[in-house]
């Protein structure tokens, strides 16, 4: 139906058959205008007409809810996420880029590429792209529809932020028709916040008495991790797509061709991409944008330089962290001179004490700076920063304010030296600085500065697995003063939980049941849940097996711990320090009185030849098991589970949406089985 007819349409007496046809036309029209407005930056209808089309679609879908689909333009704002974010495994590892600072490092990278490829400079083409200062994400399209999206995370898995990404109108919920699209297309992009929007957000936050964001990148990352997608939608985020996984399926032999293909799909690409050959032309591109970036409506902190030809990329390969065929050329940061008026200590969410220089406000790289991190006590001493000093500051990578140098010539004798406090400035507990570490820490479970993260970790799936007690509920409990440490969870009653917003009778009973059920979790999970520094899940299992009881572990000394295989001096010192803290002992005593399991059960091994002395790797999502359940079964029958595929891996168990581990297994010729075969093995 033509646009003019749609705008004049009366849907008050429409029946379901007519509604289905109109809905299709409205969605097609709205998707077309989203493309012109957010991708092409060239709107072809007024905002008022766009709003009218959207209201028409909303009214029909409200009348006929059976017509609502996940990729409808009305579904960009989803329901608030319950209990935080789930994790998703990327189809292929999201690597970081090697940085280069200055022309010499750029030239060294190019020379290495030419040498490794055994080619002349004129034979290797590169693609130069602006390095957008935002938050990296992965988007998955299934049969052309956007189905899920995730943060970079650790590169292997990221947080599921699909609902929040749907609020970004520059992300098409359906790819353009007329383009041959694989059944599954995973693309990578950078979500960012424009300069003007960033200033407006900070202005509003100041007016509301809230802390302002440090920079657009942090604001974008924070916006993507809002529990309520409606809050994300209030911030005008956008995105540039810069690549795709499994590019051989896209009919492209090089990176530039792949970008052209993605553009035809309706995805938004940065318009300043350029193919170049040779050091001088690449240098010219970098130098041009170092100056012209100031005129861009978004922040960019450098240039990404990629070898164009995919076969050359494959030959160059990658390290565990970086592709050897790409480089991030970073622009030199701007510098200013200001004065240190004080040095305060902040306590982070992990208990780390960080000295922060309070500065006379100064404008650097387009924003006002009044604080600069000094990282740790050693850094303060190394730079000899004193209260009252005149200093040169810059934004490292154009983002983090940092003191470069103290101008000692301007000292007049009134400056004061800084000393790190021996007790936590928030809770008063003794501060610990582990041997060989530069960071001092508060390791109290009851410290207000760390209590949120400590409680969220304690309740998480890998620890006590309290279903329903995610970050959002923990925050509500803390705000109401109902809990102050992990042990307080077990003293909540029906009225405490029922009084929380959106809690009904059933949800209250469910959470209380989950809390009570967690009391019987194995000792290893409790140890992991306590959040002892350097004690991950594997180390927690070793400690539980070795000591058999929490009280035995609490009484162990440094030498006894260090003598255990896989427990080094750093871990031993951390454990001893943790159990010396009075506040931690008080929390543990409350856990004991609440009836938690403090003893470990001896693992029963029923050795089977299919599992005995074999190494397994799990990848993808299993339908009938969690990963931990599958790992427990493998170990029960005498096998071993590791996280990475290597030549020593015997079997890879691949579930749905298996990622790069499956590809690695195929390359190495390792046996791969599916979930059904795994179930047959365990009987």
Image (tube, rainbow, N blue to C red):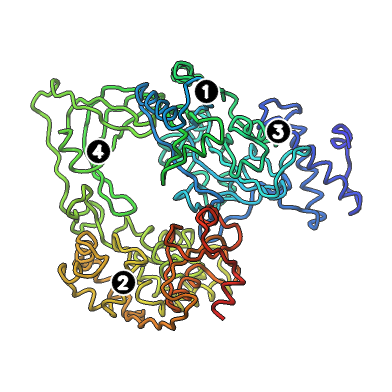
Task: Return the disc, 1 or 4, that comes first in the chain's sequence.
Answer: 1
Q: Give the CA separation, mark 3 to mark 2.
A: 54 Å
Q: Which residue is mark 3?
A: 264
Task: Return the disc, 3 or 2, that comes first in the chain's sequence.
Answer: 3
Which is nearer the eye, 482 or 650? Answer: 650
Residue 123, which numbered label?
Answer: 1
Q: Position of residue 16 (x, y in %)?
A: 89, 54
Task: Return the disc, 2 or 1, that comes first in the chain's sequence.
Answer: 1
User: How many C-alpha atoms fall within 10 Å of the one at disc 4: few (<14), some, or many (≥20)?
Assistant: many
Residue 50, which numbered label?
Answer: none
Q: Is residue 312 left or right of residue 385?
A: right
**Figure check: 413 above or below 514:** above
Can residue 85 be seen from the camera position used here?
no
Q: Nearer the viewer, mark 1 or mark 4?
A: 1
- Circle 3 SS class: helix
Q: Are marks 3 and 4 in contact (CB under 8 Å)?
A: no
Q: Give the CA separation, mark 2 to mark 1.
A: 55 Å
Q: Which residue is mark 4?
A: 374
Q: Nearer the viewer, mark 3 or mark 4?
A: 3
**Figure check: 579 above or below 424:** below
Q: Is residue 444 left or right of residue 451?
A: left
Which quadrant: the C terminus?
Answer: bottom right
Based on the displayed image, in which of its 4 quarters is residue 489 positioned?
A: bottom left
Q: Which residue is mark 2?
A: 542
Q: Are marks 1 and 3 in contact (CB under 8 Å)?
A: no
User: How many C-alpha atoms fall within 10 Å of the one at disc 3: few (<14), some, or many (≥20)?
Assistant: some
Task: Return the disc, 2 or 4, that comes first in the chain's sequence.
Answer: 4
Task: Return the disc, 3 or 4, that comes first in the chain's sequence.
Answer: 3
Q: Position of residue 474 (x, y in %)?
A: 44, 62
Task: Name, please, the residue furthest toward the front.
Answer: 118
């Amino acid at each position: 139906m033509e646009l003019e007819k749609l705008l004049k349409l009366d849907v008050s007496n429409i029946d379901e058959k007519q509604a289905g046809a109109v809905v299709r036309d409205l969605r097609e029209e709205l998707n077309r205008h989203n493309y012109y407005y957010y991708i092409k930056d060239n709107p072809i209808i007024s905002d008022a007409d766009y709003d009218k089309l959207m209201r028409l679609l909303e009214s029909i879908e409200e009348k006929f809810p059976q017509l609502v689909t996940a990729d409808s333009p009305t579904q960009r704002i989803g329901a608030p996420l319950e209990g935080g974010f789930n994790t998703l495994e990327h189809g292929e590892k999201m690597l970081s880029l090697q940085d280069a600072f200055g022309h010499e490092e750029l030239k060294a990278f190019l020379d290495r590429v030419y040498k490794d490829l055994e080619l002349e400079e004129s034979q290797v083409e590169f693609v130069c792209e602006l390095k957008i200062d935002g938050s990296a994400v992965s988007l998955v399209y299934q049969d052309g529809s956007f189905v899920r999206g995730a943060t970079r995370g650790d590169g292997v898995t990221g947080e599921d932020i699909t609902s929040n990404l749907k609020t970004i109108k520059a992300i098409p919920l359906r790819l353009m028709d007329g383009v041959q699209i694989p059944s599954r297309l995973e693309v990578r992009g950078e979500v960012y916040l424009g300069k003007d929007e960033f200033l407006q957000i900070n202005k509003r936050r100041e007016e509301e008495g809230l802390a302002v964001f440090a920079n657009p990148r942090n604001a974008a990352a924070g916006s993507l991790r809002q529990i309520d997608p409606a809050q994300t939608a209030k911030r005008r985020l956008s995105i540039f797509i810069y690549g795709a996984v499994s590019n051989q399926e896209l009919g492209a032999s090089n990176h530039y061709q792949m970008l052209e293909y993605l553009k035809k799909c309706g995805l938004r690409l940065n318009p300043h991409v350029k193919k170049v050959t040779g050091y001088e032309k690449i240098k010219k591109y970098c130098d041009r944008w170092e100056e012209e970036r100031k005129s861009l409506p978004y922040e960019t902190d450098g240039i990404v330089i990629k070898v164009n030809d995919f076969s050359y990329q494959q030959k160059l390969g990658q390290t565990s962290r970086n592709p050897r065929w790409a480089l991030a050329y970073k622009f030199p940061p701007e510098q200013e001179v200001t004065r240190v008026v004080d040095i305060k200590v902040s306590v982070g969410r992990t208990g780390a004490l960080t000295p922060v220089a309070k500065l006379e406000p100064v404008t650097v790289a387009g924003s006002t700076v009044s604080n600069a991190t000094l990282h740790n006590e050693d850094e303060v001493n190394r730079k000899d920063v004193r209260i009252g000093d005149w200093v040169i500051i810059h934004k490292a990578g154009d983002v983090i304010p940092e003191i470069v140098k103290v101008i000692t010539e301007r000292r007049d004798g009134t400056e004061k030296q800084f000393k790190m406090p021996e007790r936590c400035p928030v809770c008063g507990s003794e501060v610990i600085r582990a041997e060989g570490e530069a960071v001092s820490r508060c390791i109290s479970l009851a410290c207000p500065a760390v209590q949120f993260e400590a409680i969220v970790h304690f309740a998480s799936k890998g620890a006590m697995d309290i279903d329903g007690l995610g970050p959002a509920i923990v925050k509500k409990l803390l705000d109401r003063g109902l809990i102050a440490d992990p042990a307080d969870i077990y003293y909540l009653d029906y009225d405490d939980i029922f009084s929380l917003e959106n809690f009904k009778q059933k949800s209250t009973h469910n959470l209380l049941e989950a809390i009570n059920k967690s009391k019987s979790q194995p000792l290893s999970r409790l140890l992991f849940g306590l959040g002892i520094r350097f004690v991950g899940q594997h180390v927690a299992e070793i400690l539980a097996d070795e000591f058999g009881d929490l009280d035995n572990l609490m009484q162990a000394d440094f030498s006894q711990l260090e003598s255990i295989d896989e427990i080094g001096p750093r871990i031993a010192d951390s454990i001893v320090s943790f159990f010396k803290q009075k506040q931690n002992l008080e929390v543990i005593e409350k856990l004991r009185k609440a009836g938690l399991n403090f003893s470990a059960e001896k693992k029963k091994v029923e050795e089977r030849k299919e599992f005995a002395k074999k190494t397994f790797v799990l990848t993808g999502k299993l339908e009938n098991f969690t990963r931990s359940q599958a790992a427990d079964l493998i170990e029960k029958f005498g096998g071993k589970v590791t996280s990475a595929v290597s030549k020593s891996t015997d079997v890879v168990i691949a579930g749905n949406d298996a990622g790069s581990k499956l590809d690695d297994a195929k390359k190495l010729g390792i046996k791969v089985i599916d979930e059904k075969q795994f179930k047959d093995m365990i009987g």
